[in-house]
Image (cartoon, helix red, strand yellow):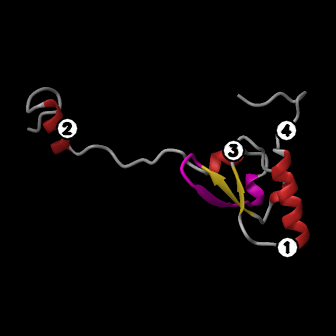
């Protein structure tokens, strides 16, 4: 569900201060932030922002196509390790049932 137009976009104030400072100095070091719900603005394009995913900060290079999206969309919080193999399922559920190999 999107944010109300009446409320406007949400951008963390401290993050915008860091973005402005990085723009002034021309710094290319990643900007660390925990503000995953912050919206990406045109001022952030070209900067690298390290977004916290719950465990570590993942660097995200902001591009023009990302404007309007949230920072958290580009830093995944869960790791997909793949589906279980048939042998592993048969060990869990036994040799009978719908997972039985034929």
Measured as percent of width and height from the top left, residue 57 is found at 61, 56
Which label number is shown at residue 36? Answer: 3
Which label number is shown at residue 9? Answer: 4
Q: Distance between the residues labelled 2 and 1?
A: 54 Å
Between disc 3 and disc 4, the foreground one is 3
Along the line of sight, which residue is nearer the eye, 82 or 29?
A: 29
Sort mark 1 into few (<14), some (14-19) or many (20+) by Cα contacts within 10 Å: few
- At mark 4, the secondary structure is loop
Q: Distance between the residues labelled 2 and 3?
A: 36 Å
Asked if the magenta segment contains residue 17, the reply would be no
Residues at badges 2 and 3 in contact (C-beta under 8 Å)?
A: no
Q: Mark 1 points at which residue?
A: 26
Q: How far apart are marks 3 and 4 (CA)?
A: 13 Å
Q: Quadrant of the C terminus?
A: top left
Dividing the picture into quadrants, the one containing residue 39 is top right
Residues at badges 4 and 2 in contact (C-beta under 8 Å)?
A: no
Q: Distance between the residues labelled 1 and 3?
A: 24 Å
Measured as percent of width and height from the top left, residue 76 is found at 56, 48
Between disc 2 and disc 1, the foreground one is 1
Q: Magenta segment, which residues?
A: 53-66
Residue 25 lies left or right of residue 86; in this view the side is right
- At mark 1, the secondary structure is loop
| Marked residue nearer the N-terminal end (4 or 1) | 4
Q: How far apart are marks 4 and 2 (CA)?
A: 46 Å
Q: Distance between the residues labelled 4 and 1?
A: 26 Å
């Amino acid at each position: 569900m999107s944010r109300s137009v009446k409320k406007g976009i949400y951008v963390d104030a401290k993050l915008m201060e860091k973005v402005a400072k990085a723009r002034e100095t021309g710094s290319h070091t990643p900007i660390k932030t925990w503000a995953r719900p912050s919206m990406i603005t045109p001022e952030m394009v070209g900067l690298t922002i390290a977004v916290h995913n719950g465990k570590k900060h993942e660097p995200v290079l902001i591009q023009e196509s990302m404007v309007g999206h949230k920072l958290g969309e580009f830093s995944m919080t869960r790791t997909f390790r793949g589906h279980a193999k048939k042998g592993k399922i048969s060990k869990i559920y036994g040799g009978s049932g719908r997972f039985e190999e034929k």
